[in-house]
Image (cartoon, rainbow, N blue to C red):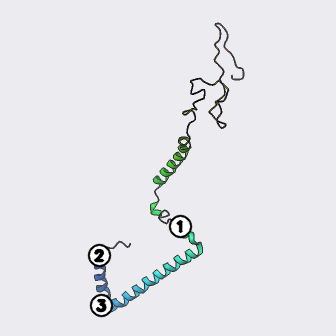
Amino acid sequence: MIGINGYELLVLAILAVAVLGPERLPEYASQLARLIRELRRMASGARDQLREEVGPEIDEVDWRKLDPRQYDPRRIIKEALLDDFEDAVKPVSAKPSAARTPAAGSSAAAGVAPAPGTPSQDAGPARTQPPAVTPLVRLESGAPAPFDTEAT
């Protein structure tokens, strides 16, 4: 609490006896005891007043989290970044993939691909097929390449 070990306390007591003398030492010791009692009473009164004004939720506060000695910017940034990463990854890893577990009677299980533009039978109402891709058409030999006037 104060950071004084037994040896330092002994040295302070010897110094107090030497400086104050044996006549005044009991008087100062009783004043110190009264001061400590008064400080404890004031602290207890302040705690009770705070609890009375704030309410019962004051007991639920974790005061160690609010201790400024616990403030480490590197740890706070690391936790914030990891929380964002876990939030971003969790929905992806939590969803089961319908494509990995096709129904036994579906065309995907039989090895037949559905026609382009038609929705899959096991996809459900929430899943839609990507738009159909037009097949690549090769130009005939000697034909000019298409030219887009808006692109240039």
Disc on the earlier residue, 3 or 1: 3
| Residue 29, x across and y down, in percent | 36, 87
Name the residue rendered at 30%, 90% in the picture.
22
Mark seen at residue 60: 1
Q: Quadrant of residue 98?
A: top right
Disc 3 is placed on an element classified as helix
- Residue at the limit of the structure toward the front, as seen here: 105
* Label 2 sits on residue: 6
Name the residue rendered at 56%, 69% in the picture.
57
- The mark lying in front, picked from 2 and 1, is 1
| Residue 45, x across and y down, in percent | 52, 80
Give 1 or 101, whichever is nearer the viewer: 101
Disc on the earlier residue, 2 or 1: 2
- Residue at the limit of the structure toward the top, as seen here: 142
Which amino acid type is shown beneath numbered disc 1?
Glu
Name the residue rendered at 65%, 11% in the picture.
139
Measure the alpha-carbon separation of dots 3 and 1: 49 Å
| Residue 117, x across and y down, in percent | 67, 26
* Label 3 sits on residue: 22
| Residue 46, x across and y down, in percent | 53, 78
Within 10 Å of the Cα at label 1, are there few (<14), some (14-19), or many (20+) other Cα atoms? few
Q: Quadrant of residue 150?
A: top right
Measure the alpha-carbon separation of dots 2 and 1: 37 Å
- Number of marks drawn: 3
Vertically, is 118 above or below 83? above
Disc on the earlier residue, 2 or 3: 2
Disc 2 is placed on an element classified as helix
13 left or right of 87 in image: left
* Contact check, label 2 and label 3, Cβ < 8 Å: no
- The mark lying in front, picked from 3 and 1, is 1
